[in-house]
Amino acid sequence: MLIAVVSLITPAFLKPMNLGNILAQTAVIAVVAMGQQLVILTRGIDLSVGSNLALATVIGGLAYQQVDSSIVVIVAMLLAGAAVGAVNGVVFVYGRLPHPFIITLASLSICRGLALALAPGHTTMRGMPDAVTAIGGGTTLGVPNSFFVVAMLGFLFLILTKSMVCGRWIYAVGGAPNAARSMGIPVKGVLLATYIICGFCAGVGAVLLAGRTAAASPIYGNLLELDTIAAVIIGGASFLGGRGHLGHALIGAVLIGVIRNALNLLGVDVFFQMIAIGLVIVIAVEADVLRNHLEARARVLQSARVQ
C-alpha cells in the first residue's frame, strides 16, 4: 500500500535507478536488522550496532593502509564486529547484568570513542580495495551486489531459525527462559551466540557501507540501532521475545528505506525524516502491545469456552 501511494505521488519512485538506490541504501539496515532480530527474539536488545559498524569500518580502513588486500580488510571488519558482539554477550551473560541494555549502551559509547580515537585525524579515511567496493557499490545485471549479500545471509539465517535445532533454541529461550533451562537447553550459550552473530552482522554491514562509499569513517552508523530495532518491530517481532520471522524483519527494513526515499523525493527536510521514523517506531511498539493484549484475551475466552 505504501509503495502504491508513493508511486502515485512521485512517479520517479518506480524508475529502475531509484529502485536500485533503495535496495542499496537498505542493504546495511537489512543485514544488521537480521542480527538484531535474533537478539530481540531472546528478549534482548543491542544498542551498539551503529557504533560497532563505525569501529569496524575504521579497523578495515587501517588494515587497508597497511596491506592492500581485500581478504584482509574484509576479515578485519568481520572480526571486529564479532568481537564487540562477543564482549557484549560475555559481560551480559556471565556478568549477570539485569538487562543487555546496560552493556550495549556502554558499548555504543565505547565503540564510537574508539572509532574516533583510531581514525587518523578523527575523520574519514578514503579508499577501499576493489573487491570491497564491488561488493558494496557494484551491480550485476542492474541489481546492486549488496542485495545478493542480503539474500545470501537471509537464506542462511532462514535455515538457522527454521531447520536447525540451535535456531529453535533461540525461540525457546526467548519464549520461556526458565522452561528452556529446565529442558536442558544451554541458555547462556544461546544468548552469547546471538550477540556474537549480531556483532558479525554489524561487521557485514560495515563491509557493505565501506564498499558503497569507498571509505571508512568513525561517524558511520549514526542511529543505525534505531533503524534496525524499528525494522524488527515493524516486521512483527515482540520485545517479549520468542516471536518474529526473519522475512518480516527484511520487509521492515525495506519499509524504512521506502519511507526515507519517498521523503527525499518529496523534498522533506532530513530532520522531519527522523521524526517520521520515530513515529513509526512508536506506532509499531503500540501495535505490539495491543496485539499481545488481544491475544491474551482471546486465550482466556478460548479456555473459558473449552471449560
Image (spheres, rainbow, N blue to C red):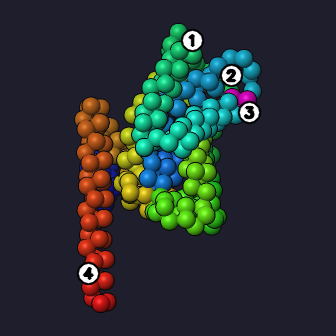
Residue 32 screen position, x and y as percent: 51, 43
**Relative to 58, is 104 on the left or the right?**
left
Kindly identify which residue carries mark 1: 120
Q: How crowded is mark 4: few (under 14 residues within 10 Å), some or many (20 or more)?
A: few
The residue at 30%/65% (across/down) is 292
- Work out whether 16 lies above or below 157: above
- The residue at 30%/47% (across/down) is 281
Image depth: mark 1 or mark 4 in front = 4
Observer-side mark, 2 or 4, equals: 4
Whole-Å distance between the Cαs marked 2 and 4?
61 Å
Determine the secondary structure under disc 2: helix
Q: Main secondary structure of the magenta part?
A: helix
Instruction: Indicate the quadrant where residue 175 lies.
Output: bottom left
| Residue 178 falls left or right of residue 166 | left
Name the residue beneath numbered marker 4.
301
> Is mark 2 in CB contact (under 8 Å) with mark 1?
no
Q: Earlier in the sequence, mark 3 or mark 4?
A: 3
Disc 2 residue type (three-letter): Ala
Residue 63: which numbered mark, if any? Answer: 2
Q: Is residue 109 above or below residue 276?
A: above
Q: Is residue 67 above or below residue 83?
A: above
Which quadrant would residue 74 be assigned to in this image?
top right
Farthest residue toward the top? Answer: 121
Q: Toward the viewer: 99 or 297?
A: 99
Quickly name the residue at label 3. 71
Residue 8 shows up from this direction: no
Q: Counting other residues with Cα less than 10 Å from the Cα at mark 3, is it few (<14), some (14-19), or many (20 or more)?
A: few
Q: Earlier in the sequence, mark 2 or mark 3?
A: 2
Mark 2 crowdedness (10 Å alpha carbons): few <14, some 14-19, many ≥20: many
**The magenta segment:** 70-74
Q: Which amino acid does label 3 sit on?
A: Ile
